[in-house]
Image (spheres, rainbow, N blue to C red):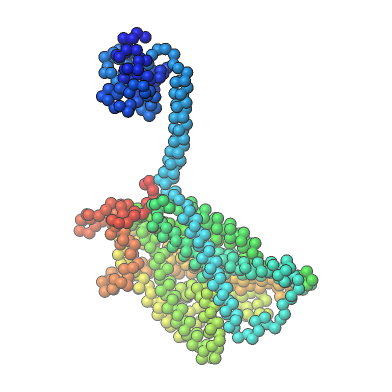
Amino acid sequence: MPETNYPYGHGDDQNRPGGGLPAHESGSNGHGEAPFSPTPSGGAFGSSVPGTTSGPSFDSAAPPTSPTSASSAAPSPWGVSAPSGPAAPSGAQGAQGAQGAQGAQGSHGTQTLSARQAGTALRKVGIGNPLPTFAVGVLAYIVALGAALLVIISAVLVALTADTGDLTGGGTVPTDDSASPSGDGGWRAIVGLVGLPFQLVSLASFGSYDAELNLGFFGSATMSWRGLPLLITVAMVATAFLAARLIQRRWGTGRWGSNGVLGALLWSGISGLAVAIVAVIATRVTAFAIEDDTLGLSLSMHSAGVDMFFGTWALIALPLFLGHVAGLAKPAWWSLVADLAAAPRLAFVHALTFAVPVWILMAAGISIRMVVEGDGQSVLSLFLSLPIWGLTGLAMLPGLGMLAVPLHLNARGGVEDFGVERGNDFLWFFDLPWYLWIPLVLITLFMPVVVALLWNRDREIETGNILALVVSWVALPLAYFGCSAVLLALVWTTMQAEMGMVGELGISVGLAPWTPVVAFFIGLLVEVLARFGAPFVDRFVPGMLVNWFRRSARTRRADGTPSTRRPSHGQAPTGQPSHGQAPQGQAPGAPFFPGV
């Protein structure tokens, strides 16, 4: 190429600006120019210091320069054209090596970016960090084991204080090698005793405690017990719900959260499944078993089965999911269906405010009667056994409080041999002593008025929306129906046995099967009282008695969560933060449906 094409002479001259650049067959811009590389001198024309060589820069692409305008261009580094001669091998190899390193670095960056994009995409649909949910599932099962230990301690104390004289009944326990710790049967018995908490947690998860006894020449016997120790069940469910709601409210949008409805459903289901698998394995491994080959006796007791697997899964996963949903920031349309979430809470409050005072009156009345009759020792045993039967008895009282629901007692088979009368009976509230059923009826008639005041205070109904109107009418009846169906399953207790010499027998205790139907109409009655009766007396009720029920709804309105309810007097609220914006000094909650 002629030398006149170079404003400062030959391209290899070290005295021109940009001289000494290695030649390139093709530059980054496709015209063979070397890309711009800033030099330490920083002159007006980018002239380099003599004796130094500036390498090509791959961080920025050089602008293209047409050959016709190269001679008239200002003397600048990108106005210099590389010589047409062959490039030096060392320079080409260095450029190719640098380009290869740049390509590898770009590929690695692309992979990292893709992972970040995947995480961002998952968070947009509400799938965040699963570790807090997994930890809460494990915590709920551990708390259930602790409650099982409390039940065992209660049973031991009752046995020690019972007026029986001899705890062993005067019998002797075989002490041969099979029952000693050094024998195989002895170790299995010890493992079974250690595993009792696992068996009780399994029983509290809708499992059945099955026992198989082989008496050799005398035949065999099987027994099955199905009944929930409600203290264990309530401890597990309450821990899962409250802890999940806590982590969702405090860390819902941070590094440890970012879970929406989809993430809560996914991780809660997986957490419940993992806990259920571990529970089945632990329950089966710690089964109580004794074998005595000399007497031909064997005893096996455990509660592992398909029923407890699905029960544990449900009792862990469902409270976890509901806790996450309760802690999410509610969407703008939430006020239309808010009654569906508040109605089960009102049904629970109704049952609790009725059952607790009735339970206290009944416990006091029965205890006084026992003391008067000289059976004070049984009173002590009765109160020491509260962890075993207390919550179950408390849960049965709301059924009796409906006045149209009795307790169903069914004894069949050869129960006479055990001192139980055979029959299929119903225990109504008026079958109780007069000093028990009179307070029960009075409290039953008073409670619907109280809960109607709770339901009415600070309630919002969008009168112009058909969905809100329908929900406002059906929320309470459906909630009472559903909660009573759950109560019916929790308090039902059955015992079945089959013995060679006695035959088959069974005993079952629970609420009448029509309990949900009666509860449906009680919920409808509360709704009618809240609409047409409570507004007339609401102004006379102190706020401290009723304001606590809809506290979260008032907090959302104070934080500026928009409501579909029309403001009174046709004025729109002003000065409130937009939806999803947290008040000053607080972290925003996770959205209910991220990305929507």
Q: Residue furthest front?
A: 51
What is the tally of numbered marks visible in this picture? 0
Q: Is residue 512 visible?
A: no
> Measuring 34% from the left and 62% from the top, which residue is drawn there?
552
Q: Quadrant of the N terminus?
A: top left
Q: Report the side of 331 relative to 429 (left or right).
A: left
User: Residue 76: image x %, image y %?
Assistant: 29, 20
Q: Residue drawn 32% across and 56% down? A: 586
Q: Is residue 186 above or below residue 313?
A: below
Q: Position of residue 324 (x, y in %)?
A: 43, 57
- Left/right placement of residue 472 relative to residue 417 reads left
At a point 45% along the width and 26% down the height, the residue shown is 99
Q: Nearer the viewer, residue 583 or 502?
A: 583
Q: Residue furthest top?
A: 2
Camera-side residue of 476 and 270: 270
User: Residue 500 appears at what percent x and percent y?
Assistant: 73, 72
Asked whether the viewer can see residue 187, the reply is yes
Q: Is residue 100 above or below residue 449?
A: above
Judge whether 501 appears above or below 7 on screen. Answer: below
* Residue at the (70%, 83%) spot, across then down: 170
Q: Residue 446 location in percent, x, y?
A: 37, 76
Would you place residue 200 above or below residue 435 in this image? above
- The answer to which quarter of the image holds residue 582 is bottom left
Closest to the observer: 435 or 7? Answer: 7
